[in-house]
Amino acid sequence: MSHPENTDAVILVGGKGTRLRPLTMNTPKPMLPTAGFPFLQHLLARIEAAGIKHVVLSTSFKAEVFSNYFGDGSQMGLEIEYVFEEEALGTGGGIRNVLDKLRHETVMVFNGDVLSGTDLGGILQTHEDRDADLTMHLLRVADPSAFGCVPTDADGRVLEFLEKTEDPPTDQINAGCYVFRRSVIEEDIPTGRNVSVERETFPMMLNNNRKVYGHVDNSYWRDMGRPTDFVRGSSDLVRGVVPSPLLAGKHGESYVDPTAGVAGGALLLGGTAVGRGSEIGAGCRLDGTVIFNGVTIEPGAVIENSIIASGARIGANTRISDAVIGEGAVIGARCELAGGMRIWPGVVVPDTGIRFSSDA
Ligand code: GTP
């Protein structure tokens, strides 16, 4: 039996999230509202549900946003501690830097922007069964050519780490969740400088004959780093395609925060999420869309596959698809936006003032 209560969780949340700009200019990526809650809250709830109690957040960019929201973690039944990097240390440096906070021999490390449905206890079990130095969650994907791949032998021992190639020899990729033996963090990751676990630490561990194993499955998995994936991941959480303990029993076509208002005749589809205090006008149609907090959508607007950040206002009968609207931006009435457009925070677009489409 695995022992989650004797496991530390470390979550890497120090990245700048540049691919999601402008959403990440004031809010770190793991704190963006996703299916009604900061993305990280879904991960913390999964960690708690798996039986792990002690969590260390490895922070750098906008660190205070995390501690202001989660505090000591007791409201979630967790004990959360924070470690801050003045200068970003990379994924490996971020793990090494929390060493003093670790209490147990087994350390489960999470990428703070991966949405996954994998069985955490199963990965811990593999680690224990193999008496491994490192156990990596490996995911089977339909098209591995877009990723580096990680072949294993019949016993699950990792053979090598291969760069992206057109014709990969295995369909297993690194899913960004690792279980370390604590002493290995101390011995194999240097201090005081930027280290990438993927590029530097893992290949070195194989060279040094460390026992590196893979826990292979084909669970739900999504890197939330780009707008299209962020929208898709939020929608999948709302619809229960990937489970979150925060939404148990509340899955459906949409999630509306109890403090939000939706006028009669508005249609919310495709896993749309509406955040705290937002107001959706009559006759709007929102499909696969993430509405952050304090947003106003005026009557008759049609929005699909888009993200509308906090405090933004969308005018009546405006149509938006595949776009990102930054915090506090104001889009006037009867505008049209499509095709990956990103509107920066605070920008004001007058009525009928914009018509943009990739096929215009
Ligand atoms: P992009 O800039 O859009 O690539 O996003 P990112 O900065 O978050 O980088 P990436 O998605 O590659 O990071 C993977 C995970 O590691 C994320 O959860 C990041 O928050 C985290 N991370 C990346 N760099 C650092 C770092 O230097 N220190 C710490 N503590 N965490 C990091």
Image (tube, grey):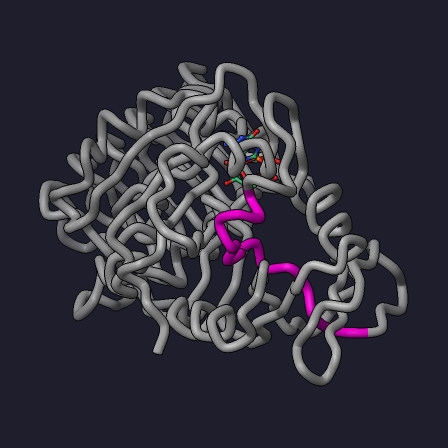
Residue 233 picture location, percent across and down: 45, 56
Query: Does residue 102 show up magenta in the picture?
Result: no
Instruction: Say above or below: 326 vs 163.
Output: above
Query: Does residue 183 show up magenta in the picture?
Result: yes
The magenta stretch is: 170-185
Residue 151 picture location, percent across and down: 76, 71
Splitting the image into four quadrants, where does ligand 1 fall? top right
Say which quarter of the image contains residue 328. Answer: top left
Q: Nearer the viewer, residue 177 or 257?
A: 177
Q: Nearer the viewer, residue 318 or 95?
A: 95
Instruction: Say above or below: 143 vs 234.
Output: below
Instruction: Say above or below: 73 vs 249.
Output: above
Q: Residue at x 52, y 47 (%)?
A: 183
Is there any visible trace of residue 268 in the rendered image? no
Q: Nearer the viewer, residue 248 or 73?
A: 73
288 sits left or right of 95 in the view: left
Would you say the magenta stretch is mainly helix, strand or loop?
strand
The quarter of the rendered structure image containing the C terminus is top right
Q: Residue at x 44, y 74 (%)?
A: 125
Q: Residue furthest right?
A: 166
